[in-house]
Image (cartoon, rainbow, N blue to C red):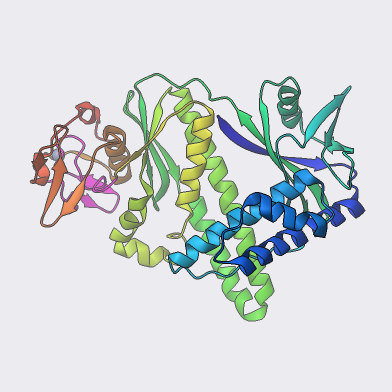
Amino acid sequence: MIKKTIQLKIKEPDVFNFNFLRQEYSKTLNLGIEYIASQYPKKIKQSQLYNHLKPMVALPSSVLSEAVRLVRSRWITFCKQKKQHIKTSIPHFKNAVAVSFNNQNWTVHKISNTYFIGFPVNGSKPYFELALSQKQKDVLDKLIQKQIRPCAGQLLERKGKWYFFATIDFPEPVQISSTNVLGVDLGLNNLAVCYDKEQGKTIFFSGKEVRFRRTKYAARRKLLDKAKKLHAIKSKNKERRWMRDFNHKLSRQIVNLALKLKANINLENLKYIRTTAKSNHKQRQKLSSTLHNWPFDQLKRFIEYKAKELGIRVNLINSSYTSQECPKCHHIDSSNRNGNVFHCRACGYKSHADRVGAINIANRQPDDVVTASLPGIVYPSRDGLLGTAPNLRVAQTGNGQRASTT
Ligand SMILES: [Zn+2]
């Protein structure tokens, strides 16, 4: 099952009762935390907490159950963090907290072409009209026809508007069964370089626009910083939204490309991205304030969940030395790469350096372990034997040879 949350806008919210519900909810949460803390180190059961809170607050019992669950899970997280000496403080809930409902407590109704959502408010379960896009209507139709299942829901306010966040269980899509692989290399120069293993084709997603925009943001902030702190923060948030938006679009393009090619995706394991970025010292210095903190982890997450929705598998690949390894003869040498040019010292193979990275990622298997143990590199081979010389890599695939020089 794949969980997805859709944001449903409530047309005419009952602001008075919504506000009351929310206040009671946050009051309940804080009282709950207070109670658990006062009983510490004694462990408090869910039912105990429920019975303690019940006479103190005016919440529908189903909403109270959700509050109890949230209090417990927050408290457990807090205790774990304490144990691990992570800096933390006793959970506190703001007045503007989102109110949670369980899957049985919200329902969608349709009357002709108008959709309503119902959830418990102030002792009854009123229905509210929704303002929806066609796409959202299609999802709700499936929900009404019981093709998909409702999960948790949340009522929350954003900038004076009220929304119901409905989480829905979608069935797993049919998995792509082809053997083709799209190798995706993420980096600073090109945000993403994709290599279609079957066709031997490379698709570049340039980082040019991103570099330009981020430099502009940074420059503007430098001016703003001195003038007005608040504006600087606003600019930072704006940049963050823009980056998120960009990552959404880029991940969509990559996933659609994989779908078109009927390919599963090989993506570098993020642990290594930052190291790769660091290795290029000059570039890092130049971009340190602007680009090297691009949210690649976010981009990766977007690619992963968008792919999953389409039945595309994402293999996480160890990407160590992907920029230094020759896809043709597997010779690894840091001097193979010089800026954007890859030139193999051993066999003379030449290509764009980022393209080589994508080819290597496409050629590797998810269970390939590449560990650097200076001065040599250890490649545990398929049969579990260790080979030490970097250029004696146990070759598991011949497809790299297909790569032509560009
Ligand atoms: Zn070579």
Please indicate whether residue 332 sits to the left or right of residue 73 in the image. left
Q: Is residue 217 above or below residue 108?
A: below
| Residue ID at (57%, 59%) | 43
Residue 167 among magenta residues: no
Please indicate whether residue 79 sits to the left or right of residue 143 in the image. left
Q: Is residue 290 above or below residue 152?
A: below
Q: Position of residue 170 (x, y in %)?
A: 61, 28
Q: Nearer the viewer, residue 299 or 140?
A: 140
Please indicate whether residue 112 sits to the left or right of residue 405 in the image. right
| Ligand 1 positioned in quadrant | top left
Q: Nearer the viewer, residue 302 or 346?
A: 302
Q: Is residue 136 above or below residue 390?
A: above
| Residue ID at (65%, 76%) | 229
Residue 97 visible here: no
Query: Which contiguous range is marked in magenta?
Result: 319-345
Q: Position of residue 238 (x, y in %)?
A: 64, 59
